Each structure stands twice: as C-alpha cells, then as structure tokens.
C-alpha cells in the first residue's frame, strides 16, 4: 500500500440517538452496501462521483477529538465508497443547535459504502513509503508532499529555513493504543495528530492528520522517520502529558 489520502470528516449522520444511554458500537459503524450521509469540509477537495477513503470516528471523538477519548482510535474506521454531492451547507442562524453549528459551511455527500476497515488494521498493512505515493500532493500546501511532516519557514540570524512544524509544538499529549503510539499537539495555529510504531529500533509514522484553520489534511501509510524528524518527535513524546478517556458510553 502506498501513501493513501484520507478525507477527514466533519460529521456522519446516524439514526441512533447518542444521548440515549449506552450505544452499541457495531450498530453505529458503516457497513458495506449501505448508503450513508457524511459532511466534509468545503476545502477537502472531494468531487462528485469519485471513490474516496473517509475517516469515521465514534461519536465522542468525532465531536471532541481523539485527545479526549484516545481508546476510540482503535474503533475508528477507514470507509471507502463512491460519493455523491448533495449540497453545500450554509451558515447557521443565531440559536442554532450544536449539530447545525458543527456542519455549517460544510458539504453534504451521500456515500455508497464499498469497504470498511479499522484504522489501525490499515496502518498495520501499510508498506514503507518514502513520500511519493499515490495522492502524494492531495490536500497538502503547494510544493509539499502529503506524507512529509508539515513544515513552516522561520527566520534565524537573517537566514530563512524550513523546519518540521512539530518542532514548534507547545502542548503535547500521548497515549498507547493497541501497539501504536498516539501523539497529539498544538503548534502555531495548527492541531497535529500522529500515529506511530516502533519496529526494530526505528520510529515509524503510520497516520498523520494536520488541521489548519479551515482545512484538515490526512494521510495513511508507513513512513520511517529520517534526518532530524526522529529527534523532534522523541522530544514531543518526552514532554507529552498522558491522555485518558473521559466517558464510558459504548457497549
């Protein structure tokens, strides 16, 4: 498997009432053959009729993020299907519900589900990728491959240089999830999520998600860290606070 572009999602519509006590995870997950409604960012670049790989998260982390419920990484799914554009969602009115505010300015799609695989299972199956895989520049800033770490330019002693955005991380949090290391951070205006593994002394990046204001990009593969990147990521891990679940609601 080469590097795979993943489309992060804003919200998956579901018929089960999430406030009604404990929920059955199996009933929530998309299934092959189903048609599901999903909302994605307008900047995601998803086109009518294309086959896409979309990220599905359980309800709590869908709204609050993995950092608030890291165990749900193990239940997250890569949903593959053909998408049909329904509409662009407008602004929400004053007094709108939390859901209406969440999906405001997103694009609504219907997904005909043809495949569904656990995120961590997909990470385990991924082969080494040096950064030039399929969809290499999809969703990435101009001139930067999607499987690069996000980079920013800085000025030091009058010299402009490019550095790994993780080197500018402030808050960091981490958790162990089914043999993977989950690392989350904030850096400048970005939110960063990374899934890592250690194999034979080598630190591997398996999934990366970067959220800038108004745009989120994600890629899945299996990338050994080289150059200065291992030291940068190890520093983030060393200063990261331990993350824990906040709720217990799934059956």
Image (tube, helix red, strand yellow):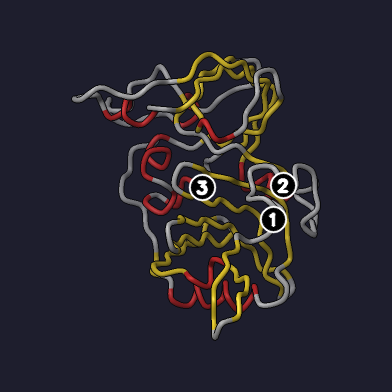
Rendered residue at 57%/75% (across/down): 232
Earlier-in-chain disc, 3 versus 1:
3
Rendered residue at 71%/72% (across/down): 202
Left or right: 140 as drawn, with respect to 239: right
Asked if labels 1 and 2 touch by Cβ distance under 8 angstroms, the answer is yes
Q: Residues within 10 Å of mark 3 (few under 14, many from 20)?
A: many
Q: Residues within 10 Å of mark 1 (few under 14, many from 20)?
A: some
Quarter of image, res 81: top right
Q: Nearer the viewer, mark 3 or mark 1?
A: 1
The label shown at residue 214 is none
Q: Position of residue 178 (x, y in %)?
A: 56, 55
Rendered residue at 53%/44% (across/down): 216
Q: Which residue occupies the foreground of this view, 164 or 82?
A: 164
Q: Give the vertical position of 126 relative to 156 (above or below).
A: above
Distance between mark 3 and mark 1 Cα atoms: 27 Å
Residue, disc 3:
73
The label shown at residue 137 is 2
Q: Give the vertical position of 240 relative to 39 (above or below).
A: below
Q: Residue furthest front?
A: 158
Asked if labels 3 and 2 touch by Cβ distance under 8 angstroms, the answer is no
Under tag 1, what secondary structure?
loop
Rendered residue at 68%/20% (across/down): 82
Quarter of image, res 122: top right
The label shown at residue 144 is 1
């Amino acid at each position: 498997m080469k590097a795979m572009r993943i489309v992060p999602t804003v919200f998956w519509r579901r018929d089960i009432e999430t406030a009604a006590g404990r929920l059955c995870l199996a009933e929530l997950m998309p299934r092959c053959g189903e048609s599901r409604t999903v909302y994605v960012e307008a900047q995601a670049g998803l086109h009518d009729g294309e086959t896409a790989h979309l990220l599905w998260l359980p309800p709590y982390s869908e709204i609050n993020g993995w950092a608030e419920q890291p165990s749900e990484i193990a239940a997250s799914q890569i949903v593959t299907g053909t998408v049909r554009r329904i509409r662009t969602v407008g602004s929400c009115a004053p007094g709108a519900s939390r859901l209406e505010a969440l999906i405001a300015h997103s694009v609504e799609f219907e997904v005909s589900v043809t495949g569904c695989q656990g995120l961590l299972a997909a990470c385990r199956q991924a082969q080494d990728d040096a950064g030039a895989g399929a969809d290499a520049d999809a969703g990435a800033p101009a001139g930067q491959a999607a499987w690069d770490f996000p980079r920013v330019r800085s000025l030091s002693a009058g010299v402009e240089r490019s550095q790994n955005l993780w080197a500018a991380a402030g808050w960091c949090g981490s958790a162990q999830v089914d043999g993977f290391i989950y690392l989350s951070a904030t850096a400048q205006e970005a939110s960063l999520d990374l899934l890592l593994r250690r194999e034979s002394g080598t630190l591997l990046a398996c999934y990366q998600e970067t959220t800038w204001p108004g745009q989120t990009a994600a890629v899945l593969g299996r990338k050994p860290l080289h150059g200065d990147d291992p030291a940068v990521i190890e520093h983030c891990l060393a200063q990261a606070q331990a993350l824990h679940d906040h709720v217990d609601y799934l059956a």
